[in-house]
Amino acid sequence: METRLIIAIIVVIVAIAFVAGWLYSRSRRRAQLRERFGPEYDHAVSQAGDVSRAEATLAERERRHQKLHIRPLTPEESNRFTRAWRSTQSMFVDDPGRAIRDADTLVTDVMSTRGYPMADWDQRVADISVDYPLVCDHYRQGHKIAIRQQRGEASTEDLRAGLLHYRELFTELVEGGAARQARQTDQRTQRRAG
């Protein structure tokens, strides 16, 4: 009898250790996804309606992204796109509708040049979220405004906001880590001040 009791206790201890390890691993993965995706994590949870499904979706985005051949822009490409962006911004005063269309096209061109697949807009957002989770929502918002402009439903103020949204993503795509690091530093400073 004592042997059976000892075996039962050992089995219970092993089971508890296994469950504790599994919970710790899951908690750690959740923390890693929150850290990596920032506000995009919350967006994914909101869209999925379930934390586990959202985390599976984000993990799948990471796996898919590893297979992509994303590259930085060459200095020449970066300069060319920056000049095009300045032209787009300047155009806003005289033709805000065209400026938002051009901003949408320009962001798409930069993404394509860097190697992001362009077939499906939702997939583009998912792919971008892996590298640029802090500005992913800017892409969504800018695109929504561009679509509203196509329908004739966007005011000049809406178009201005759309251009600002596109600028956030454009800056990240063209300038990359330097822009991201500056933004993260600003956000940390604002949190401390707030």
Image (cartoon, grey):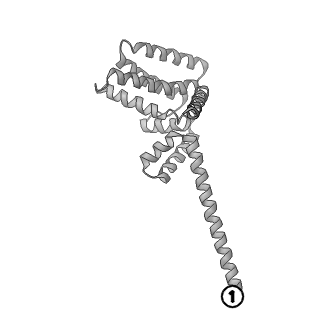
Q: Position of residue 54 (x, y in %)?
A: 48, 49
Instruction: Please determine whether, in this image, residue 29 is positioned above or below residue 172.
Output: below
In the picture, the quarter occupied by the N terminus is bottom right
Q: Position of residue 189 (x, y in %)?
A: 59, 31
Q: Position of residue 108 (x, y in %)?
A: 46, 27
The residue depicted at 45 percent of the width and 31 percent of the height is 139
In the picture, the quarter occupied by the C terminus is top right
Three-letter code, disc 1:
Met
Q: Is residue 94 visible in this depiction of the protein?
A: yes
Instruction: Please determine whether, in this image, residue 27 is positioned above or below residue 168.
Output: below
> Which quadrant would residue 16 be assigned to in this image?
bottom right
Nearest the viewer among 173 and 117 is: 173
| Circle 1 SS class | loop
Left or right of 15? Residue 145 is: left
Left or right of 140? Residue 34 is: right
Left or right of 58? Residue 98 is: left
The residue depicted at 50 percent of the width and 39 percent of the height is 39
Q: Where is residue 132 in the image (x, y as percent from the top left)?
A: 54, 34
> Which quadrant would residue 18 be assigned to in this image?
bottom right
The residue depicted at 48 percent of the width and 39 percent of the height is 126
The residue depicted at 54 percent of the width and 40 percent of the height is 38
Mark 1: few/some/many CA within 10 Å (<14, 14-19, 20+): few
